[in-house]
Image (tube, grey):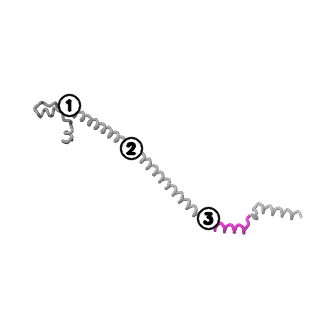
Amino acid sequence: MADKNDLDSFPKSDKDNDEKEGMPNDYSSEFIQISRRVKLLEESLSNLRKKLLVNEQNDLNRYKKLLSEDKASSSEINELKKEIENMKRVVKEFVGELKSSARKEDVEVLKRYIEMWNPVNFVTEGNVEKLVDDRLESKKLL
């Protein structure tokens, strides 16, 4: 895509002037310059293609890494969701247990009844039988 100005930038030789005067022109030096420039452009293009290939490979590697990180994050999020659901279930069970347990007022009523009856002073059936037997023996002895 060289425009006319680029071609005009080639150095003019005395041969060009000679050609105008009717002498044959030697295009070999111009051909050598053009072929050098083409080789430089080809090398530049080749280097750019290599860089592009490396960049594409790096992009693919980054994409694979991001994809694996995304999968790991998704699995961690799913595990956390399961744990949260489990915690919700446990809290609901705990609340249900608390609702079915005795309230403070109920315990205080029972406490008053126990204090009023004073079960520490209750006797067992065996104690009553022993007391009765002891009394009967003591009356027989008298």
Question: Badge 2 is on which residue?
Answer: 62
> In the shown orientation, is residue 106 left or right of residue 44?
right
Q: Sort mark 3 into few (<14), some (14-19) or many (20+) by Cα contacts within 10 Å.
A: few
| Quadrant housing residue 113 | bottom right
For the residues carrying marks 2 and 3, which lies nearer the camera in this image? Answer: 2
Q: Estimate the spatial distance between the alpha carbons at disc 3 and disc 1, rounded to whole Å.
A: 109 Å
Among numbered discs 1 and 2, the one appearing first in the sequence: 1
| Mark 1 and mark 2: Cα distance apart in space | 49 Å
Question: Residue 97 at x, y = what percent?
Answer: 57, 61
**Does the CB distance between marks 2 and 3 fall below 8 Å?**
no
> Residue pushed farthest right?
142
Q: In this view, does 10 lie to the left or right of 138?
A: left
Residue placed at 55% from the left, 61% from the top? 95
Q: Is residue 29 magenta?
A: no
Residue annotated with mark 1: 29
Report the residue at 81% width, 63% height from top: 131
Please name the residue that numbered disc 3 is placed on.
102
Residue 121 versus residue 19: which sits nearer the camera? Answer: 19
> What residue type is disc 2 on?
Arg
Q: Give the range drawn in magenta.
A: 101-119
Q: In which quarter of the image is the N terminus?
A: top left
Q: What element carries label 3?
A: loop
User: Residue 47 versus residue 59: which sits nearer the camera?
Assistant: 47
> In the image, what residue type sits under mark 3?
Ala
Q: State the image coordinates of residue 69 (x, y, percent, origin top left).
A: 43, 46
Amino acid identity at mark 1: Ser
The location of residue 140, given as percent across then percent down, is 87, 63
Q: Position of residue 122 (x, y in %)?
A: 75, 64
Query: Which element carries disc 1, helix, strand or loop?
Result: helix
- Note whether 52 is above or below 87 in the view shown: above
Q: Say if the magenta span includes residue 112.
A: yes
What residue do we see at 46% from left, 51% from top? 77
